[in-house]
Image (cartoon, helix red, strand yellow):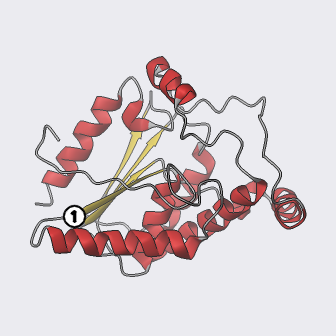
Amino acid sequence: AAAGYTTYAYDQRGFGASPTRGRWPGTDTLVDDALAMSLLLHQRHPGVPVYVAGESMGGAVALVAAARGLQADGLVLLAPALRSRREFGALFAFGLWLAGHTIPWMPAGPTSIDYSPTDNPVVLEKLRKDPLMLRQPRLDMGYGLVDLMDAACDSLEKLDVPYLMAHGLGDKIVPEGPVKSAIRYMPRRADSKLAFYRKGYHLLLRDKDGALVTNDTVAWMRNHE
């Protein structure tokens, strides 16, 4: 906002305060909503560049939408969710399929693995107290998320808009392996950038060094105006 940009954010279906909170809406529905939002913003701001920023799952939605005709002047992909079934392996994929089709209602439950999304303790405390956070998502939401990530990976080669892809080397939620695999399929464009942050985690904009990522994003967008 301080740089002169207007940001719109909406609760994706199944998340936030949406009426279907806690239920997976499906890849097609999530992507159709992104396409509709892009059209609405172009109508509200004719002639103004529109950049679609997606963080984590939102990055996967943005990638699939871009392959389906998204009207955008560029994509800002912040730690996009790109862990496909190929990356998880056949055993995990089968177990997830079995759980998603036999006990879809079961909460995923906690894990002992360190999946800390940020190095910022203030943000972690805010997330801990946020009543809209989904802390025990159903297993079928995990199954649906992997479907979305598969679709995002399949969309990489079809990218025909400028993109900025940012990844934190401290990210344990979307680790280095899947990111390297994804980059191999992304088109090389003179108007696009890959940005890696040594001290970055999953919530890049909210990390202790989040201002650096924000400034880099603004600089990249300005180069396209």
Say which residue label 1 marks: 50
Q: Is residue 162 left or right of residue 178?
A: left
Instruction: Give coordinates of residue 187: x percent, y percent.
Output: 40, 69
150 over 55 or under it: above or below:
below
For disc 1, the neighbor class at 10 Å (few under 14, some 14 to 19, many from 20) is many
Q: Is residue 123 left or right of residue 115?
A: left
Secondary structure beneath dot 1 equals: loop
Which residue occupies 20% across, 45% down?
218
Which residue occupies 82% across, 63% down?
100
Q: Is residue 159 visible?
A: no
Please, which residue is most extreme toward the front here? 19
Instruction: Give coordinates of residue 112: x percent, y percent.
Output: 78, 29
Quadrant containing the C terminus is bottom left
Numbered circles on residues, count: 1
| Image quadrant assignment for residue 28 | bottom right
Amino acid type for the residue under numbered disc 1: Val
Q: Is residue 96 visible?
A: yes
Instruction: Give coordinates of residue 99: x percent, y percent.
Output: 86, 59
Quadrant containing the N terminus is top left
Instruction: Give coordinates of residue 194: x percent, y percent.
Output: 37, 51
Q: Is residue 98 left or right of residue 28?
A: right
Which residue occupies 87% across, 64% down?
94
16 over 181 or under it: above or below:
above
Q: Is residue 144 left or right of residue 193?
A: right
Please, which residue is most extreme toward the bottom here? 69
